[in-house]
Image (tube, helix red, strand yellow):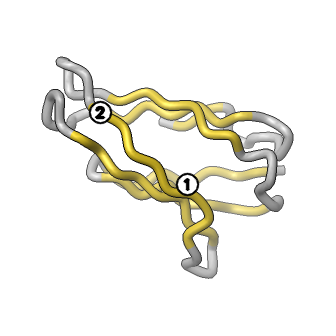
């Protein structure tokens, strides 16, 4: 899940991805609707198979984005 959604461009975006292999590195990326990668990140899943992260999106332009990760794809809007 991603919150807040919609997000303000001056705010950080928090994400939680579940259903991952415990203690494994997790790569995620945020792409815009043109398919261009605007952010990438790596985290480690905890013992429950979840990852929580906060992403600074203050340089992002308003629009719709997709977070891609091994746990799935999540759409969100930046206003």
Please name the residue shown 69% across and 40% down the image.
56
User: How many numbered callouts?
Assistant: 2
Left or right relative to 24: residue 36 = right
Position of residue 16 measured from the top left corner of the image (x, y, whole percent): 43, 31
Q: Residue furthest bottom?
A: 34
Q: Give the secondary structure at mark 2.
A: strand
Position of residue 13 measured from the top left corner of the image (x, y, whole percent): 65, 36
Position of residue 79 measured from the top left corner of the image (x, y, whole percent): 84, 50
Q: Nearer the viewer, residue 19 or 51?
A: 51
Position of residue 60 measured from the top left corner of the image (x, y, whole percent): 77, 56
Q: Residue furthest left?
A: 21
Cα separation between marks 1 and 2: 22 Å
Q: Looking at the rendered structure, which numbered label has been put on residue 64? A: none
Left or right relative to 69: residue 5 = right
Depicted 52 relative to depicted 69: above or below: above
Q: Which residue is mark 1?
A: 75
Q: Nearer the viewer, mark 1 or mark 2?
A: 2
Which is nearer the N-term, disc 1 or disc 2? 2
Disc 1 residue crowd, few under 14, some 14–19, many 20+, Cα 10 Å: some
Q: Give the secondary structure at mark 1.
A: strand
Please name the residue shown 29% across and 44% down the image.
26
Please name the residue shown 34% across and 51% down the image.
27
Please name the residue shown 42% across and 58% down the image.
68
Q: Which residue is mark 2?
A: 44
Depicted 11 relative to depicted 30: above or below: above
Disc 2 residue crowd, few under 14, some 14–19, many 20+, Cα 10 Å: some
User: Residues at badges 1 and 2 in contact (C-beta under 8 Å)?
Assistant: no
């Amino acid at each position: 899940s991603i919150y807040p959604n919609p997000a303000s461009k001056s705010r950080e975006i928090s994400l939680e991805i579940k259903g991952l292999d415990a203690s494994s590195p997790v790569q995620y990326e945020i792409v815009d609707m043109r398919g261009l990668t605007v952010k990438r990140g790596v985290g480690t899943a905890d013992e429950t198979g979840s990852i929580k992260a906060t992403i600074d999106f203050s340089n992002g332009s308003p629009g719709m984005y997709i977070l891609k990760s091994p746990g799935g794809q999540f759409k969100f809007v930046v206003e």
